Image (spheres, rainbow, N blue to C red):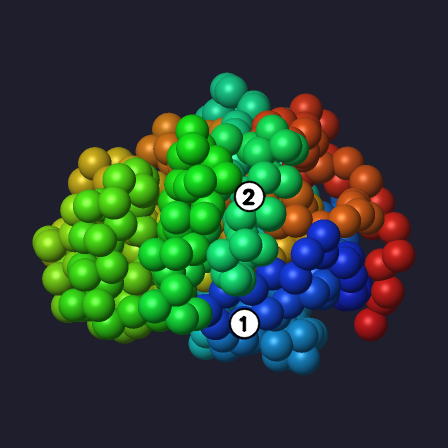
Amino acid sequence: MKIVGMKLGLLSAPLRVPFRTALREVKYVDDIVVEFYASDGTVGRGEAPPTAAVTGETLGSIQAALQGHIFPSLCDKEASLESLCAIVEHSIVGNHSAKAAAEIALWDIYAQHCSLPLYKLLGGEDHTIVTDLTISVNEPDIMAKDTVDAIGRGFETLKIKVGENPELDIERLRAVRSAAPDAVLRIDANQAWTPRQAVRILERMDAEGLNIELVEQPVKARDLNGLKFVTDNSPVPVMADESMFSPEDALNIMQRHAADYVNIKLMKCGGISNALRIASAAEVYGVECMIGCMLEAKVSVTAAVHLACAKNIITRIDLDGPALCSEDPVVGGATFDGKYITANQAPGLGITEIHGLRYI
């Protein structure tokens, strides 16, 4: 496989409602799309969102990494997929989302060459999964309204953002639970709590019978001791998210039992290759995984859908980025129908066009 050309474009899509967490507020999806051109004319696509609060990357840094380092390292090299992915990994330090976009495009081309949808190339059989939907952190009455809307759209599992004001978090969960008494509720604090504060809040939620399935990233990303403290003392199972970027991070968390579950995101770990390594480690340690996304449109989320269809250790799905958008400019790829996501049967990612893509 030889990559001979690249184009970058800006994909923009408005959100149904502003996306608010303890870390940021976003009203539009504004992502970089990379198109790689193979020597035989095959086009592969990948996507990277600017998530400076988590990965440290901006639109400018993603563009610079792809144009100045990743593509020049790949260009005109005849090599296997594995070798090309290794080149991407070592082309620049960090820049995980830019690397993920490049890797997704490479896997897309390779699967097209094999005439297989990506999930089948990865060994998967089932091609339909069920996602949750995120409820942004807001005043309790707004979150209750958003919850009613989500249930009305057919979602049965909700991920509730908390942590912006810990004093309100109990009231927020009461409002959401009242609006959706039968829903599965997951909460995501996005690093907002201290370890002891997290345990106290989770104990109160448990005592009130709010029935929380899990709490995601309750403490600061690098505070593994604090994460383990919460895991050891919380009545609610704990999932690591921002604490885990690389396969090495995953192994460290699993070996220390610093969390009950881990959240794999292509934009954090640098692409499909490292995601597969994390999934393999999770299989060894018996740690169930969630597959998640940043605020991404359908290009990169389609890649995550294919990965989820291929790995049984991925038992929870948080791929609601496209469902949060009020329009979908991507033609082809996975199909989103309420809570159901179905991987396409076309070779690769199956994406044929992106409306309104502005090349840069």
- Find residue 321 and report its horizontal and vertical position in percent: 62, 49
Placement of 226 over or under 346, stated as above or below: below
Q: Quadrant of the C terminus?
A: bottom right
Q: Which residue is denoted by mark 2 in the rendering? A: 147
Q: Which residue is denoted by mark 1 in the rendering? A: 24
Q: Residue at x 50, y 19 (%)?
A: 125
Sequence-wise, which precedes: disc 1 or disc 2? 1
Which element type, helix, strand or loop, lies under badge 1?
loop
- Find residue 278 and report its horizontal and vertical position in percent: 33, 48
- Find residue 308 and report its horizontal and vertical position in percent: 48, 35
Across the whole image, how many numbered discs are drawn on residues?
Answer: 2
Q: Residue at x 30, y 56 (%)?
A: 240
Closest to the observer, 217 or 302: 217
- Find residue 315 and report its horizontal and vertical position in percent: 37, 33
Which element type, helix, strand or loop, lies under badge 2?
helix
Residue 107 visible at all: no
Quadrant hosting residue 31:
bottom right
On the picture, is 61 further left or further right than 204?
right
Count neighbours of disc 1 (C-alpha within 10 A) and say few if under 14, some if 14 to 19, many if 20 or more. few
The amino acid type, in three-letter code, at marker 2 is Thr
| Measured Cα–Cα span from mark 1 to mark 2 | 20 Å
